[in-house]
Image (tube, rainbow, N blue to C red):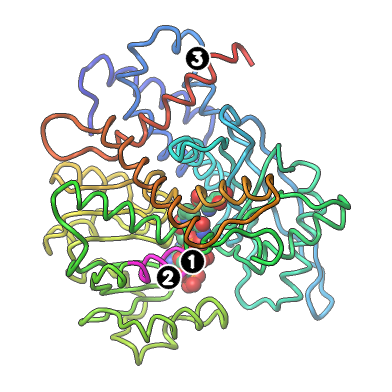
């Protein structure tokens, strides 16, 4: 994906060299920045005012990073300490907004890449939200509810000073779902002695929005539907390989079945399940309750399909790949297998699930490739709607929120088309999403002057 002119290529290399020097060892962050800069640089270089204001240098530097220790006690009375962060990346468009991730792999590079992506994703939704991300290197697997509660309370005891409904509004991500948001919210209220919409993804009985749980997966399918409609096609009868079996993957699979697509795989960190005839609706509920409620591995559901331990799902023939697990889960070898099997579209439910080399190969082969910042924006969009409902002290019905979600995904798709249609070849969704998301942020930053 070289830049169109040698001059632009030189600028790109010089910028990335500086960024790597300023942020050593942060490989995920470098990868996310390179993808955005590659897309926006030709436009950026045509605007001297942006350059003079150093918009690119400023937007790649977080406003601030809060880093802190979280001390907590296990059920058997042992003391544990974890590391946690909140990366408040950019609030040009609204209060900081983005999820919290609990996973042993969490580090500053991963949270910076996620916070950076979130700026442009949130911009694409058209809602007033800045970009942030946070989390901890805490592993919720194998912990009791009480241990998770004590961890969440300890984390919030520090985090509460830095967030607020008009400052920074965290939500869920990997390892953070309804249970964790409830514990975090309870502790925030205890510390602040007031109710506010400071977190999204709350329970329906205490200020949560209808459809928030389903929103990322459903939104991803709505986006994919728009991509196919553009080609005069539909999801009906398409074989879709989904990875992951968490919040995003489960509800993507549910909506795909509603569209009469064949969901041929689901996976988790230990292996994948192959459904040669497509996932059956009655089995979906079994998988949901096993993963969402019992937190069981997919290997315990091997009677529902063919289970492959220690393997990724990408060698299974499919028409559409929908990676919904984690970053860089689909590499160039996986891309080659998908291409051999004639995949024609990749629609990202996860954040940056495709490696740079794999994305370049898809581009070269003319595969339609929707980046997460466009196709998984439904989750944060409904979070934005949760904030609106909280501010108005009312709640909309499932139908109303779903309708708005569909509308937002369709508008994001239109924004990608308008900046990603090149006149030749298929729509470049990556360029379209990056450029459309970036332009608004750059304009706002320029208007604010040197802040
Ligand atoms: P969950 O924790 O609910 O599920 C994560 C899923 O991915 C699980 O199946 C998990 O397997 C698997 N997984 C996690 N890490 C790895 C790994 N290193 N290798 C292989 N599999 C892995 O998270 P979500 O569904 O919420 O998030 C999934 C992706 O979607 C992430 O990239 C997240 O950033 C993104 N996203 C989430 C949104 C949301 O609203 N939740 C919104 C937009 C994007 P196991 O069960 O074995 O751990
Ligand atoms: O990556 C994401 O967009 C999320 N984890 C959701 C963020 C949010 O604030 O709802």
Looking at the figure, which quarter contains the N terminus?
Answer: top left
- Tags 1 and 2 in contact by the CB under 8 Å rule? yes
Left or right: 68 as drawn, with respect to 247 = right
| Label 2: how many Cα within 10 Å (few below 14, some 14–19, many 20+) | many
Q: Residue at x 38, y 33 (%)?
A: 36
Q: CA distance from mark 1 to mark 2?
A: 6 Å
Q: Which residue is mark 2?
A: 250
| Label 3: how many Cα within 10 Å (few below 14, some 14–19, many 20+) | some
**Most frequent secondary structure within the magenta stretch:** helix
Q: CA distance from mark 3 to mark 2?
A: 42 Å
* Residue 314 to residue 289: above or below: above
- Tags 3 and 2 in contact by the CB under 8 Å rule? no
In the picture, the disc for residue 232 is none
Which x, y percent locates residue 420? 25, 33
Q: Residue at x 52, y 26 (%)?
A: 59
Secondary structure state at the residue bearing disc 2? helix
Q: Residue at x 63, y 78 (%)?
A: 142
Which x, y percent locates residue 291? 50, 78
* Ligand 1 is within 8 Å of the C-beta of the residue at disc 1: yes
In the picture, the disc for residue 247 is 1
Q: Which residue is mark 3?
A: 54
Q: CA distance from mark 3 to mark 1?
A: 38 Å
- Tags 3 and 1 in contact by the CB under 8 Å rule? no
Left or right: 120 as drawn, with respect to 94 = left
């Amino acid at each position: 994906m070289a830049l169109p002119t040698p001059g632009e290529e030189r600028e790109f290399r010089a910028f990335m060299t500086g960024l790597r020097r300023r942020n050593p060892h942060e490989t995920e962050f470098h990868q996310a920045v390179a993808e955005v800069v590659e897309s926006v640089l030709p436009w950026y270089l045509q605007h001297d005012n942006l350059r003079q204001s150093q918009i690119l240098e400023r937007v790649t530097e977080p406003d601030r990073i809060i880093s802190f220790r979280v001390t907590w006690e296990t059920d058997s009375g042992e003391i544990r300490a974890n590391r946690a962060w909140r990366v408040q990346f950019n609030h040009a468009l609204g209060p900081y907004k983005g999820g919290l991730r609990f996973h042993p792999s969490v580090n500053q590079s991963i949270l910076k890449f996620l916070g950076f992506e979130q700026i442009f994703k949130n911009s694409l939704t058209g809602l007033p939200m800045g970009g942030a991300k946070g989390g901890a290197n805490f592993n919720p697997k194998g912990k009791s509810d009480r241990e998770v509660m004590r961890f969440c309370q300890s984390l919030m005891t520090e985090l509460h000073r830095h967030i607020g409904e008009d400052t920074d509004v965290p939500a869920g991500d990997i390892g953070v779902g309804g249970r964790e948001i409830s514990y975090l919210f309870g502790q925030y209220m205890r510390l602040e002695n007031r109710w506010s919409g400071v977190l999204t993804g709350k329970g329906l009985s205490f200020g949560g929005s209808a459809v928030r749980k389903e929103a990322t997966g459903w939104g991803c399918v709505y986006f994919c539907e728009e991509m196919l409609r553009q080609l005069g096609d539909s999801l009906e009868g398409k074989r879709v390989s989904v990875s992951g079996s968490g919040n995003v993957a489960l509800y993507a699979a549910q909506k795909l079945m509603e569209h009469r697509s064949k969901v041929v795989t689901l996976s988790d960190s230990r292996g994948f399940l192959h459904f040669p005839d497509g996932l059956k609706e009655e089995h979906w509920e079994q998988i949901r309750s096993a993963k969402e409620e019992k937190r069981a591995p997919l290997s315990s559901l091997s009677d529902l399909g063919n289970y492959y331990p220690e393997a990724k799902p990408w060698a299974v023939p499919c028409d559409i790949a929908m990676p919904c697990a984690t970053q860089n889960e689909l590499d160039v070898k996986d891309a080659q297998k998908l291409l051999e099997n004639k995949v024609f579209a990749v629609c990202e439910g996860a954040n940056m699930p495709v490696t740079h080399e794999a994305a370049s190969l898809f581009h070269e082969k003319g595969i339609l490739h929707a980046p997460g910042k466009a196709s998984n924006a439904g989750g944060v969009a409904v979070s934005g709607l949760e904030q609106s409902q909280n501010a108005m002290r009312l709640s909309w019905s499932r139908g109303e929120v779903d309708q708005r979600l569909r509308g937002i995904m369709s508008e994001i798709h239109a924004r990608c088309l308008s900046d990603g249609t090149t006149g030749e070849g298929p729509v470049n969704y990556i360029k379209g999403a990056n450029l459309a998301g970036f332009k608004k942020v750059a304009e706002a930053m320029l208007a604010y002057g040197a802040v």
